[in-house]
């Protein structure tokens, strides 16, 4: 059982942390805990308990009532967007895969690349059947015979729960030669992979699943038409998959009543840096203010910034706290949903220090296959280091903006663009603080200590 803390969130929406209650059952009983469904401290892989709460009803209805075309249409009209970060419409991938020649594959991305976000781990350990059922529904809809859950080889507790849940699903006939009487063969299995941050990126993950070196693949063709071992492959984040059974059972219109029209449903966020750290499930469109507030007030200190999206996230100022947590609004603000990580920085934080640590992480993690990313992120990281150590050169900020615009656009994966976000959002919203570092070698927050040394040595 996971010991990840859960932050209380308002009730009243369809929760992916709970098995999908059927029509007539109380909808949106979600406390965000999942314990209601299986008894506090219960076993998440207990199939009987999960089925009593509605698990696998979605697959049954997809087979009995909707069929492949109807299922794809239902997901399309629900407006479900991928929770893996970019918010790509789920049904578009399904259509592309379904119309490409088979055999086909569906993969649950449970890698959880960002160490500051355990949202996907919590879901897999709390409601594994929602993810497995979502996988089975996608497989049925696109005609895939292989359904793989990919997780880190080191995720011991998650692996134990998934192994038990997958074995129970096979025994109960939800996978196998004639999955739930659909006449469809489904090989549902767990595969572990191990690597660095980049392995969560879908083309790199697919290479790792093939047992090859984790390097990205040129797109197009996209995995939906040319993925695992060249087969049409739908890769979804585990949260995307977990929403699918609920949509099939309760209908796309009911799903669209939660969240906002351009981003319906709920999403998991992990709030850190406040009084309480932990994972919460919130309707998409919830304001950053409300999300950051879930963690409490950070010892009564004033909030200075919110880092949204993980190591390659954007650093947003308090004036943007009313930004709705959606794929498009965050992107427009210079951040992204990314891993679901929301880190609250109080008045003691230095934006330069924060941005340069993140940029260095992104540069270190870049796989190096795309030269502008490999060299560009390194140069950006050096500019961040110069700002923090009082060794900046005149024009460094212009150079930073130039580099960021040069880097973006020639990449094999989105890491190149995302890696520029910490410094660029820092420059966009905290320019005065960057100027202080650049022009006066001074750190207003008193964090960049080497600056004081550099300043006293050189001035
Ligand atoms: C650097 C990088 C790391 C990523 N890490 C993850 C990850 O850990 N988990 C995940 O689901 N998606 C991750 N993604 C996004 C995946 O590439 C892919 O878009 C996603 O799994 C698709 O699922 P969705 O359709 O449900 O959004 C990452 C992307 C990038 C660029
Ligand atoms: S953009 Fe960066 S991380 Fe992505 S493939 Fe190119 S070098 Fe690797």
Image: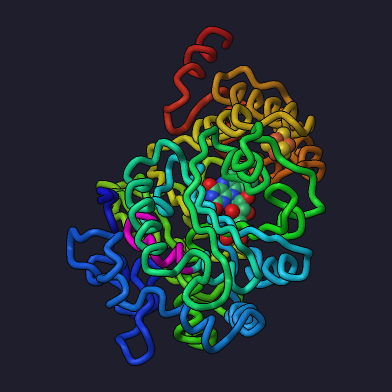
Q: Where, quadrant-wise, is the C terminus in this rendering?
A: top right
* Residue lying at 47% horizontally and 46% vertically, measured from the top left: 151
Q: Which residue is situated farthest in the front direction here? A: 177
First to last magenta residue range:
124-133
Q: Is residue 317 visible?
A: no
* Residue lying at 42% horizontally and 28% vertically, measured from the top left: 446
Examine the rendered structure and indicate whether residue 337 appears above or below residue 414.
below
Examine the rendered structure and indicate whether residue 396 appears above or below residue 83.
above
How many labels sit on residues?
0
Where residue 241 appears, as percent x and y from the top left, is 51, 65
In the image, 385 versus 31, the foreground residue is: 31
Where residue 134 appears, as percent x and y from the top left, is 50, 68
* Ligand number 2: quarter of image: top right
Where residue 12 appears, as percent x and y from the top left, is 34, 80
Q: Main secondary structure of the magenta part?
A: helix
Q: Which residue is situated farthest in the top direction here? A: 457
Q: Is residue 232 visible?
A: yes
**Is the image coloured rainbow, by chain, by secondary structure, or in one colour?**
rainbow
Quarter-of-image position of residue 415: top right
In the image, 110 versus 371, the foreground residue is: 110
Q: Is residue 37 magenta?
A: no
* Residue lying at 30% horizontally and 59% vertically, measured from the top left: 45
* Residue lying at 38% horizontally and 76% vertically, measured from the top left: 20
**Horizontal arrangement in the rendering, residue 347 relative to residue 316 (left or right):** left
Q: Which residue is situated farthest in the left direction here? A: 40
Where residue 150 appears, as percent x and y from the top left, is 51, 48
Quarter-of-image position of residue 116: top left
In the image, 194 versus 405, the foreground residue is: 194
């Amino acid at each position: 059982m996971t010991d990840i803390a859960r932050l209380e969130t308002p009730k009243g929406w369809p929760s992916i942390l709970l098995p999908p209650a059927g029509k007539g059952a109380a909808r949106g009983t979600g406390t965000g805990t999942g314990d209601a469904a299986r008894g506090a401290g219960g076993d998440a892989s207990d199939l009987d308990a999960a089925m009593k709460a509605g698990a696998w009803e979605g697959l049954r209805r997809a087979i009995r009532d909707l069929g492949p075309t109807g299922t794809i249409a239902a997901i399309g009209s629900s407006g479900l967007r991928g929770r893996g970060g970019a918010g790509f419409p789920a049904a578009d991938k399904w259509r592309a895969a379904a119309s490409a020649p088979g055999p086909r594959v569906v993969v649950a991305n449970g890698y959880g690349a960002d160490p500051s976000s355990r949202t996907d781990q919590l879901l897999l350990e709390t409601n594994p059947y929602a993810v497995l059922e979502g996988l089975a529904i996608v497989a049925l809809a696109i005609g895939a015979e292989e359904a793989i859950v990919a997780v880190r080889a080191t995720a011991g507790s998650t692996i134990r729960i998934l192994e038990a849940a997958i074995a129970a699903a096979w025994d109960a006939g939800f996978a196998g030669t004639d999955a739930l009487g659909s006449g469809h063969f489904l090989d549902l299995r767990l595969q572990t992979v191990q690597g660095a941050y980049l392995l969560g990126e879908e083309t790199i993950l697919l290479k790792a699943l093939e047992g090859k070196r984790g390097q990205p693949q040129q797109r197009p063709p996209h995995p939906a038409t040319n993925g695992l071992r060249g087969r049409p492959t739908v890769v979804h984040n585990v949260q995307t998959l977990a929403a699918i059974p609920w949509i099939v059972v309760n209908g796309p219109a009911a799903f669209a009543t939660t969240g906002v029209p351009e981003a319906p449903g709920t999403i998991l966020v992990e709030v850190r840096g406040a009084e309480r750290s932990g994972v919460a499930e919130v309707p998409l469109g919830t304001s950053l203010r409300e999300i950051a507030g879930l963690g409490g007030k950070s010892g009564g200190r004033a909030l200075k910034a919110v880092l949204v999206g993980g190591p390659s996230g954007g650093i947003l100022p308090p004036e943007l706290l009313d930004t709705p947590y959606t794929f498009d609004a965050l992107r427009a603000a210079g951040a992204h949903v990314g891993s679901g990580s929301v880190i609250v920085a109080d008045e003691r934080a230095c934006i330069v220090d924060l941005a340069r640590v993140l940029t260095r992480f992104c540069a270190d993690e870049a796989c190096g296959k795309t030269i502008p990313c490999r060299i560009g992120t390194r140069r950006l990281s050096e500019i961040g280091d110069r700002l923090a150590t009082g060794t900046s050169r005149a024009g460094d900020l212009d150079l930073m903006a130039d580099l960021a615009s040069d880097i973006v656009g020639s990449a094999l994966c989105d890491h190149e663009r995302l890696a520029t976000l910490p410094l660029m959002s820092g420059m966009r919203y905290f320019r005065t603080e960057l100027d202080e570092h650049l022009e006066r070698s001074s750190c207003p927050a008193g964090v960049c200590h080497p600056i004081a040394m550099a300043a006293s040595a050189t001035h």
